[in-house]
Image (cartoon, grey):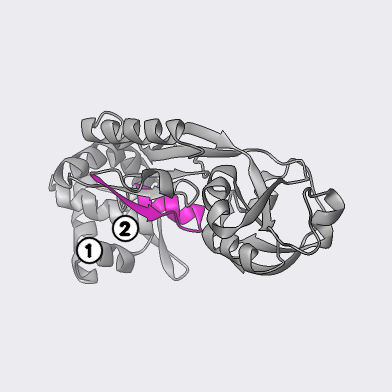
Amino acid sequence: MDLNLLSTFSAVYRHRSITLAAEELNLTQPAVSAALKRLESVVGKTLFVRSGRGIAPTGAAVALSDKIEMPLAVLETIEKRQEITRVYCSESLMHLVCDLPGLSFVEAPLSEKQLLADIDSQKVHLAIDFATSTSQAHVVEDIIEEPAVCVCRKDHPDIGDSLSYEDYYRAQHIALKIRRNNANMMDYLSQKPSPPRVIKAETGSVSSMLALAATTNLLGASTLSLAKHLAPMLNLKIFPIPLEIRNVQHRMIYHRRFVNDEDHKAAREILKSVIQNNQYQ
């Protein structure tokens, strides 16, 4: 069987779209459609059917995808081997690892769904984030955990040397757009329902949040490691968040196709070592 037919099928299966698959493969839509017809003639079954404005996989397509996903992923990894491993990294830990040689770092996307999709398509080789995955195609390893903290400027007019529950809810806040497990960050970390905060500003970057907290009377939040790293430069005060919240669990996520890849394993080990040994530097 022509392996190109399987690669084309895999792209269509992932995107549920001939158009998007054609764009990924740099092929025309007629070429993708023709490849699917050839593959259907080989397997003797219909693989996709019309569904609304798009297409949906048949049971035969689901079964075929289950059979070929891992072998095809291994073959693609061999063909696409590169010297530089691309890594999605949480902004909270980027300052610890970005100087490592042989690795290229990109800030993790706001959407957890996008992060996992980019791992599947090999846009990145692994991710360091507080996201997680329940897919058997992904390996998820816990690296470190740390508390989330609240920050404000040192000369804040209403907050002194401590931050009470009442202070916290009287203040106006900066919120983070990042969503994990379909929740915003504070809801994601909260162990029980909390009253709504007064949100005055929203940003997709923790560093932007810290800079804004340093130049306004708004309260921001961060992981402890990043707050300790930037607080001296930004003249920030750091407080425990006066709510019942979980620690932030940083994880390494990668596709199972890389489990036994020696270069990938070496990159994983150096990343874990650097982060675990330099967390609060």
> Which residue position holds label 1?
32
Q: Where does residue 3 sit, x and y in percent of width and height?
A: 15, 47
Q: Where does residue 35 sit, x and y in percent of width and height?
A: 19, 59
Point out the image quarter for the N terminus.
top left
Rendered position, 166 above or below 130: below
Please give left or right for residue 102 compared with residue 225 in the image.
left
The residue lying toward the viewer, choosing from 189 and 31, is: 189
The residue lying toward the viewer, choosing from 76 and 82, is: 82
The part of the chain drawn in magenta is 102-119
Q: Magenta span has 104?
A: yes
Q: Amino acid at mark 1?
A: Val
* Residue 82 appears in the rendering: yes
What is the crowding at mark 2: few (fewer than 14 residues within 10 Å), some, or many (at least 20)?
Answer: many
Residue drawn at x 61%, y 66% is: 212
Q: Earlier in the sequence, mark 2 or mark 1?
A: 2
Quadrant of res 23: bottom left
Please give left or right for residue 95 compared with residue 148 in the image.
left
> Which residue position holds label 2?
12
